Image (cartoon, coloured by chain):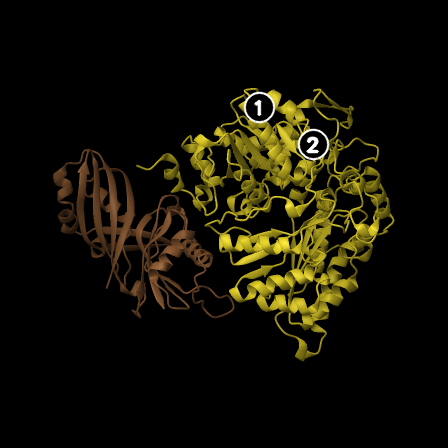
Chain colours: A yellow, B brown
Amino acid sequence: MTNNIEKILKNVQKPARYTGGELNSYNKNKDNIDLRFLFAFPDVYEIGMSHLGMHILYNMLNNEKDIWCERVFAPWTDMEEELRKNDLELFAIESWESIKEFDIIGFTLQYEMSYTNILNILDLGKIPIKSKDREEKDPLVIAGGPCAYNPEPLYEFIDIFVIGEGEEVTLELTNLLKNMKKNEDYNKHKFLEKASKIEGIYVPKFYEVEYFEKGLISGRKTINKNAKSVVKKRIIKNLNNSFYPEKTILPYIETVHDRVIVEIFRGCTRGCRFCQAGMIYRPVREKDKETIINQGKKLLKNTGHEEISLSSLSSGDYSDIDNLIIDLLDQYEKDNINVALPSLRMDSLSDELINRIQSVRKSSITFAPEAGTQKMRDVINKNITEEDITGKLKELFDLGWSSVKLYFMIGLPGEEENDVLGIKELAYKIKDLFFKRPKEEIKGNFKLTTSVSCFVPKAFTPFQWEAQNDIEKFYDKINLLKNNIKDKKITYNYHEPERSYLEGVFARGDRKISKVLEIAWKKGCKFDGWDDKFEFDKWIEAFTEADIDPDFYTTRKRNLDEILPWDFIDTGIKKEFLIREKVKSENESVTSDCKVLCHKCGVNNSIMKGPCYESNN
Amino acid sequence: MKVIIKYKKIDRLKFISHLDTIRLLQRAVRRAEIKILYSKGYNPHPKFSFAMPLSLGLETYGDYMEMELENSENPNTIKERLNKVLPEYFQVINAEESENNKTLAARLEYVIYKIDLVLENTDIDELNSINDNFFKEEQMVERVKIKKRRKKIKKFDGRKFIEKIELVDFKNNNATLKVQGIFSNEGAIKMEELVELLKKLTLNIKDYKIVREDMIFK
């Protein structure tokens, strides 16, 4: 009467996480399909469905008649328990068929702390977790996304990594697979050989890494003639004519970002030295205002969403941001459709515009000074002064805003005690700014939230050689602030250093780390990004059992001539540029926005084949 | 102008909650470009009112919802426009204008359910007398509710929420019952609770499926 899956759905929280059938999702007849692709997001449905990249690739692949792209998300622990108890395989939410039935499973790597979920998803589909143990009949397992820029910690589990932006290269891969199958010329090994010739594709099993006695890399070599020694990232050169969905899946249950998202540009010109996204997504490529408006209009019409949001690394840097926002507000205010502007630097907007946004919804103001003192902001090249922050906030307070959120990092290179205390001082100054005004001008209930995260040095940034603070040092700094911020109006939050430390291992890890990942997963680690699921003790046990010292990856400062595990990837940015930036950072010297002056990072020559901006050649 | 729509919510969509259903309809109304009235205030929401929420996991072929339109429109076009933008497992069956001032919930009298049962060792006589057996003596239901982390147990006689139970079909150990439930100001009985009561009445139930069929209003 009820099938097995339906039975277990009755026993889990939020069953609609697993049932699919949403508006604008695809159910195809599999008899007419040549290739079945499974987009796998290694976290829960509500997070995965908020991810723009998934919507782009899902619709792009389903636009192909002979491809059916479905979805799977990490099942929550109650669902996992039911699946294992009833000996059922994890299933795709469109067809409700086992994930084993697919030709390709594509994982998106958004966050290092979701890696255990990747192994768990494969295992729940009764697919061997290691590439070498998978047979011809098993799906190909591929992975892409920002964390693929340091792929080595996952090298044992993933057959193919896609480096860079996925739109074009994913179709190249699926076309190759379809053609080989059509010509009856397919086997996995042959496919991997052909795929490894495609730009942006990295097949880890065609490479070998050798180490010195102390664990440093001594060399890397290709062991298959088709493999390239350097893998160059892929980018979409022109976003105006690149695929963008006209309709996106409308979830039934509430997701993290339950709204229409229109991407307005990729890349960032600011050059913050801690920021991996700012480096790997170079160069900046903007979409035309008309394209943005049209895409938003279609998406709103096809979903009925009540909110539209602009997406980019720093929306205020869009060259025509004022007019874009005005156009959107003019169009949607009257229909009760909210215009959301995340990642917007308030200092980039005029007061008039801020006032209009406020009339739709008066939320809190967010600033990310990242560091408390000017010295540290110069070290990280944040290019924002205290006056920039306080000046803008004064204006905003006068306009009636009263709730502020500030984001900071601790553990940045060269940080001293007074730099940490600078976070407190800035917070207190902002509070004074609010209250030291004539009484009649003070409106609203002042609330300041100060969030502090622990810095994790990332690959392909000028800080890729730096030592991360150890957990104890992080706690010293956290407690220093805790003991000094004693004001009821100021809320102080901090991130757990244990998790940042672990993130640090994977962010700059090499192949040896894959063993730790496997052991930790076998010990039951999963959903490591979730506070109530993260078990640091088990991870420490895993490091011990694998005989690996995590400090080697985190607190160790690298020499500039060391071979880094990700050196074989070419992001278009030259290592010399990163070194120049590192030296400048040590001298507390800043680098201007690339719109002002080209700093010769290399992207212009290697990727754009010309200047990124006409104005600065 | 007020419009009452009768809708079905079946198949995979039985797994979405009442709150999800409200959001689904709100967005469908937007896609269909039907102008409806919103509540006033900081966060305007559409003026929808439902007869009775449906538990997660149950299908329905007869739930009712009332909404207020900005302008006067033909209810049949409203139905067509909504169905064009709604998913296949959620469709409007009927739409009509309402001039009643009372809410749907205040007017709801009976809820009709169909229960398919898979039985073992049950004979037809037992099934035929199910209604009489049910009403013969007290049918205690113990409903556990967790409110603010505290368990609360509510006890009541299930008979006061049931009008009648009818056997519609019986073949090879598969039986279909039609149940007319009473909706009063004291609430209603859940069909899962009724199934538990039937199990105690010597029915050997192996599996079952509940579907809400319709509602009857005063």
Residue A507 shows which numbered tag?
Answer: none
Q: Which quadrant would the C terminus of chain B be assigned to in this image?
A: bottom left
Q: Tell me: residue A77, above or below residue A400.
A: above
Q: Total marks drawn?
A: 2
Q: Position of residue A588 (x, y in %)?
A: 85, 51
Amino acid found under the numbered disc labelled 2: Glu
Task: Quadrant for residue B69, please give it.
Answer: bottom left
| Circle 2: element type | loop
B8 relative to B168 in the view: left or right:
right
Residue A180 shows which numbered tag?
Answer: 1
User: Is the residue at mark 1 from the same chain as the one at mark 2?
Assistant: yes
A21 relative to A325 in the view: left or right:
left
Q: Is residue A523 visible?
A: no
Q: Residue at x 23, y 46 (%)?
A: B197
Task: Quadrant for residue A158, please give it.
Answer: top right
Q: Position of residue A471 (x, y in %)?
A: 70, 43
Q: Tell me: residue B79, above or below residue A565.
A: below
Q: Nearer the viewer, mark 1 or mark 2?
A: 1
Q: Position of residue A255 (x, y in %)?
A: 52, 50
Viewer-nearest residue: A53 or B142: A53
Q: Tell me: residue B139, above or below residue A223.
A: below
**CA gap, disc 1 to disc 2?**
19 Å
Residue A199 shows which numbered tag?
Answer: 2
What subunit carries mark 2? A
